[in-house]
Amino acid sequence: MAKEAVIQFFLLLSGTVFKLFNLLPLQDKTVMLASFGDNIEYVIGEVKNQTSSEIFILKEPRCKKQFEAVSQKNITDFTPRSTFSFIRGIYHLATARYVFVDNYHIVLAACNFRPSVRCTQVWHANGAVKYFGFRDKTIKNRPDSAHKRFKKVYSRFHHITVSSDEMAYIFKEAFGADDSRILKTGVPRTDFFYNMDKIEAEAEVVRSTMPVLKDKKALLYAPTFRDNQFDTDKIHLNIDLMRKKLGGEYHLLLKLHPAVKLSGFNNSEFVTDVSGKYEINSLLAAADVLITDYSSIPFEFSILNKPMIFFPYDLKKYEESRGIWFNYETYMPGPVAYQTADIITALEENDFDLEKIASFNKQWNKYSSGRASEKLIEYIYSI
């Protein structure tokens, strides 16, 4: 309850500041509130290409993007720990005609935008395996004030971009959105996966800077974030067994979630921790096979039509605690493994169905074509 009281006080102060700035005239500027930044980067490019709107970035602490296409004076570290910067960010949110966000941002509960403002949610995932929003099982016992806050935040999204009808359904369930708020323009960051020149260039960057990949296939392990697991010293793979069975053909790349810190791990001739060293898109371009669990990465990786193995070692527990949108074992486009030995078998027997991956891609990237960013900005700035 103490935490909830702090949140309510924070929103009261933020809302008061927002109301004061809301008395000022709206400006023809674009504000982007970034937690992840991948989609935001693509939106920045198209706003610059198609409009004369000045861009301001409100960068939350977890965001690692540099946003080099935007002047540094227009990038604000958006955190309550820095009072001046935070107030400056609220000012921009209150006076911008266009707002883009890429996550659940609690401050939005305090931002009652004027009718002519357009706030667009470019969610950080192209698809979803686990429940979130109103369907998230972990919020069941939260107080009424928290549920009212969630509803306020979700109501701020005038538009929500999707690449598929499936994701449109999920957002309607998760955010309480209706069809009028769904934009079937495709998700901006998917543009990368349709540009083969960029794919090849990024794959070459990874391989040229990692001599251990010479004459080896890249096996990328990218597990999702698990609640409260910010630090870990455990990888749920038997790496010694994998090295013995696969070391002659593969090199294993570990890419943990940006919020997770891996400690006590040493690289070797078989495995390299690449967390924080390469962009995920670059690693996906270089990967020959992806191993993951409940991450949204497969929804983009399927565009490349490359093999995937699914390693939900805690599936039953995860379904009970978080919830999953579909029957995981039958739905995912690749072999489902529960032990390292199952992964090895799938690789040794080449147990992959590329037609199933292609069908998965067709379903989840129905509205993507490599022009998602262009179509989104063309629509938003013509309203």
Image (tube, grey):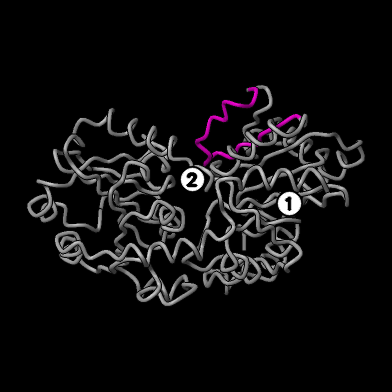
Residue receiving disc 2: 194
Q: Is residue 172 magenta?
A: no
Q: Is residue 22 left or right of residue 343?
A: right
Q: Residue at x 78, y 43 (%)?
A: 381
Q: How far is the residue under mark 2 from the one under mark 1?
A: 41 Å
Q: Is residue 127 left or right of residue 254?
A: right
Q: In the rendered view of the protein, which quadrant contains the N terminus?
A: bottom right
Amino acid found under the numbered disc labelled 1: Leu
155 vs 177, nearest the viewer = 177
Give the foreground label among 2 and 1.
Answer: 2
Residue 132 at x, y = what percent?
55, 65
Query: How many other residues sit within 10 Å of disc 2, few (<14), some (14-19) or many (≥20)?
Result: some
Q: Is residue 169 above or below residue 203?
A: below
Earlier along the polypeptide chain: callout 2 or callout 1?
Answer: 1
In this view, which residue lies farthest toward the left? 244
Residue segment shown in magenta? 54-71
Residue receiving disc 1: 11
| Figure quadrant of residue 310 | bottom left
Q: Is residue 313 above or below residue 28?
A: below
Amino acid found under the numbered disc labelled 2: Tyr
Q: Is residue 182 left or right of residue 368?
A: right
